[in-house]
């Protein structure tokens, strides 16, 4: 299963300097932290953390799952 967090306007790239796609739990955590530090009110931070939360729940249930964050174009 693949959990996809979509940042349609590339805030992770523009505001946080993170290149898309971001693959894996740790990389997504890093992207969320960088974006949160750059702009704590950006809703994409919650989107990424929400995806990680679902990832953790599914992994705990024994599912084969991955999480990614994909950015669109500014």
Image (cartoon, grey):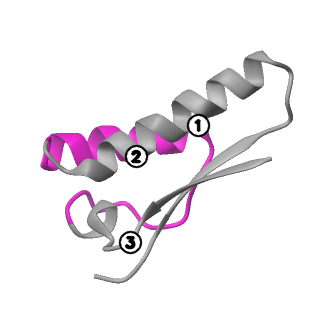
**Image-based side of 7 in relation to 35, left or right:** right
**Image-based side of 64 in relation to 72, left or right:** right
Magenta residues, as a range?
A: 15-40
Q: Residues within 10 Å of mark 2 (few under 14, many from 20)?
A: some
Give the CA distance from mark 2 to mark 1.
Answer: 13 Å
User: Image height check: is 37 above or below 44?
Assistant: above
**Residue at 86% across, 36% down:** 64
Badge 3 or badge 2: first in the primary sequence: 3
* 25 within the magenta span: yes
Residue 8: assigned label = 3
Residue 14: assigned label = none
Circle 1 residue: 25
Q: Residues within 10 Å of mark 1 (few under 14, many from 20)?
A: many
Give the CA distance from mark 1 to mark 3.
Answer: 20 Å
* 36 within the magenta span: yes
Q: Secondary structure at mark 2?
A: helix
In front: mark 1 or mark 3?
A: 3
Horizontal and vertical percent position of residue 65? 78, 39
Residue 47: assigned label = 2
Question: Which quadrant of the figure has residue 13?
Answer: bottom left
Task: Name the residue nearer the viewer: 13 or 64.
Answer: 64
């Amino acid at each position: 299963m693949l959990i996809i967090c979509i940042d349609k306007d590339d805030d992770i790239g523009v505001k946080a300097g993170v290149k898309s796609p971001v693959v894996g739990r740790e990389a997504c955590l890093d992207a969320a932290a960088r974006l949160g530090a750059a702009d704590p009110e950006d809703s994409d931070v919650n989107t990424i953390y929400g995806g990680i939360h679902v990832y953790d729940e599914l992994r705990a249930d024994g599912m084969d799952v991955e999480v990614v964050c994909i950015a669109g174009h500014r």
